[in-house]
Image (spheres, helix red, strand yellow):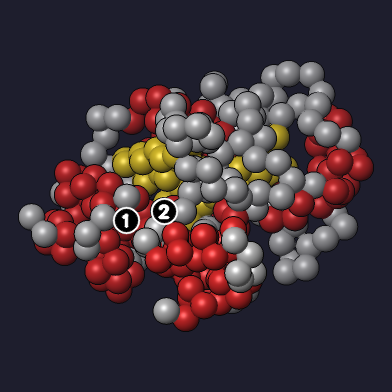
Amino acid sequence: MEPLQLLESAVEGDRRALARLLRIVEDRGPGSAEVLAEAWKKASTPHLVGITGAPGSGKSTLTNALITAWRAVDRRVAVVAVDPSSPFTGGALLGDRIRMQDHVADRDVFVRSMSSRGRLGGLAEATAGLVTLFEAARFDPVVVETVGVGQSEVDVVYHTDTVVVVVTPGWGDGIQADKAGILEVGDVFVINKADRAGVAESRRSLEAMLQMASPDGWTPPVIETVATAGTGIEELADALDRHRRHLVVGQRWRERRRLRSRAYIEWAVGAEIASRLDQPDLDGAVEAVTARRVDPWTAAAEFLDH
């Protein structure tokens, strides 16, 4: 079946067709550009939820619990879960999928794990394409779960409408909270593993920082959860719905989508340039630069002009 035919089947609910399309897009296979162009036209406007935080904070377990809550109210959920990749092989364990096995038999849940393939920012190059396919297939919400991230890996804000930042008790002090770039993109904050010591201190640090900045009238809530037990999950799901309503009522929804569109264009340009670097012509440029017949900047300009 041709890729565009697969897309038609995926829109009608064919999971096998969707799985094949996800692989084609992730690998930039034949027909991927045409599929994404058509999928973008067919895409619905689901709630795009980003879940990010430090390694070990329980993001996948939290996502699993959220899926359960959403399915209880008959919502079709898709997840793009990005795992860190090996710097040597580019492969990944894809452990996020393992932690979401509770929903493996549910036809209204689709979890796609993928390797970051060395990309910085907490996501993978193909994330935008996979999210677009899930939009076309009428999933709502669509969750984007990042790899374990630090202060500067904030690409998730360009893919989603609502960003959930997950921390654990005892995480950071007030100074670290003020410095952490990732906290600037959070719309909802979760202190997971809240059955451990240090919850009160973490809450105070977060709330003190969050009170200083709410430029659009939304003060991010701080929610305590124990994802393994399902504690606090309904409160979290409610906070996500409230933030979506806040975006729509305050006209911020379109602003977020414009930010996403701009980022997608920039990433598409970067991907196109990267694909050209695989061409044999690059070898000649490399030899010229190595022999110092030309500088790297001139070589780059000449290469892109071809």
Q: Residue at x 91, y 42 (%)?
A: 175
Q: Residue at x 81, y 52 (%)?
A: 210
Q: Nearer the viewer, residue 23 or 65?
A: 23
| Quadrant of the image containing the C terminus | bottom left
- Asked if the residues shown at circle 1 and circle 2 are in contact, with their CB atoms under 8 angstroms apart, the answer is yes
**122 lies left or right of 150:** left
Q: Residue at x 73, y 69 (%)?
A: 216
Q: Nearer the viewer, residue 185 or 283?
A: 283
Q: Nearer the viewer, residue 111 or 92?
A: 92
Disc 1 residue type?
Answer: Arg
Label 1: which secondary element: loop
Instruction: Tell me which corner region of the image, top left, top right, bottom left or bottom right, holds residue 67.
Output: top left
What mark, if any, has residue 262 been given in the picture? none
Depth check, mark 1 against mark 2: the one in front is: 1
Q: Position of residue 212 (x, y in %)?
A: 87, 57
Q: Position of residue 131 (x, y in %)?
A: 40, 56
Q: Position of residue 89 (x, y in %)?
A: 45, 32
Label 2: which secondary element: loop
Instruction: Return the residue at label 1.
Output: 28
Extreme-top residue of the structure = 196
Q: Position of residue 87 (x, y in %)?
A: 53, 34
| Quadrant of the image containing the N terminus | bottom left
- Work out whether 197 lies above or below 188: above
Return the disc, 1 or 2, that comes first in the chain's sequence: 1
**113 lies left or right of 218:** left
What mark, if any, has residue 126 been given in the picture? 2
Instruction: Tell me which corner region of the image, top left, top right, bottom left or bottom right, holds residue 104.
Output: top left
